[in-house]
Amino acid sequence: MPIARPIRPTALSALLLAGALSLTACGGGGTARDAKTAQGGAAGGGAAGYPRTVENCGEKVRIAAAPRRAVSLNQGTTEIMLSLGLQDRMAGTATWTDPLMKGLAKANAEVPRIAENNPSFEKVLDTEPDFVASSFLSTLGKGGVATREQFEKLGVPTYISPADCTKNDKTVGTDGARSTPLAMETVYEEVRDLAGVFGVEERGEKVVAGLEARMAKATEGLDAARTKKVSLLYWFANSDSPYMGGCCGAPGIITNAVGAKNVFDDTHDEWPQINWETVADRDPDFLVIGDLTRKSQTAETAAKKIEFLETNPVTKEMDAVKHQRYVLLSGQAMNPTIRTVEGVEKVAAALRTYVPAK
């Protein structure tokens, strides 16, 4: 992480004014799922409903006033904020891995993109933020943009997606593991949390209701007797040592919603790296593959993945490859975000047209 240069006077003034936006760590271990917004009165007044506190990833985050210059460090939190109509309260976004979610282009155009990947701490401070949100612990941890404590010292509250805090292994730099399957309720919780931070709770409920309706429509009428016989494999990235979806992250949400079986539901790792011989041995009915636009791993795009599958001696004989039973998803849909609903919709659509051989 680069060392931040002295802050410009304007930025320093803004950060000092934001000094009341303090973030206080909880002692001991609050549960990672705790992200309920609690409102409280304050001596000295302020806007109605403020200050308020959000319990997030084991910390109590105090919000003195509705943010006016928020920065989102990951596409997942960015798309939630834009869905909530908060573009006029955002000072910047960063770390883009996929094309923008449909319907958000106009709102997104109003917000500066400060970096395609992780920005420096200095770059974030240059936006004069009064709130910083991230989808991942690693983004606001050592080796990431900066730690939560570094922002805390400047009076800037931070928030991390609760889905990333429910992992058993929260070691920065790892994908972690889960003992309990993730559910869409945790994603809805994040939407409500961010809506509460900005004081737009009604918008949050509208977004959640829309997601719930899409989930219900996507899975309505699926024949459980058929879908339970269908096996799926989720390939996120990397052809050399591929990352496959384990039982209990976003792939688990999708699989459980459509009533199918994940061929790697025997591993609780979020994205275990599995050799191709083992993949071929599991021989799934469908390959759900990430169609990514980033360039940090091998075989990022769906086209590159399919090319590999159809030419590699180990994989080209797989039944799903022979019959080209592929479902293409964005990276955002394969992570626990509001885009996971897209994953449910696309996998469900594929299963409706497939009749298992036995």
Image (spheres, helix red, strand yellow):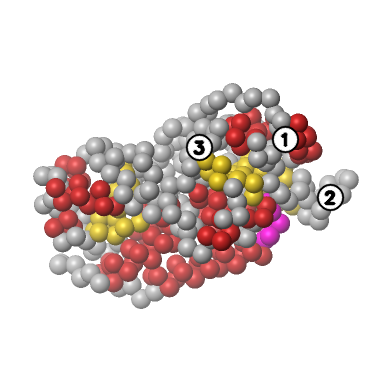
Name the residue tied to disc 3: 118
Marks 1 and 2, how far apart in space?
A: 22 Å
Kind of residue sitting beneath label 2: Gly
Marks 2 and 3, how far apart in space?
A: 34 Å
Dot 1 or dot 3: first in sequence order is 1
Residue 11 bears which disc, if any? 1
Asked where in the image residue 343 lies, by quadrant, the reply is bottom left
Kind of residue sitting beneath label 1: Ala
- Residue at x 43% of width, y 54% of height: 99
Magenta highlight range: 196-201
**Which label sits in the foreground, 2 or 3?**
3
Dot 1 or dot 2: first in sequence order is 1
Name the residue tied to disc 2: 46
Kind of residue sitting beneath label 3: Asn
- Residue at x 55% of width, y 25% of height: 2
- Residue at x 33% of width, y 72% of height: 222
- Indicate yes or no whether the magenta region holds residue 351: no
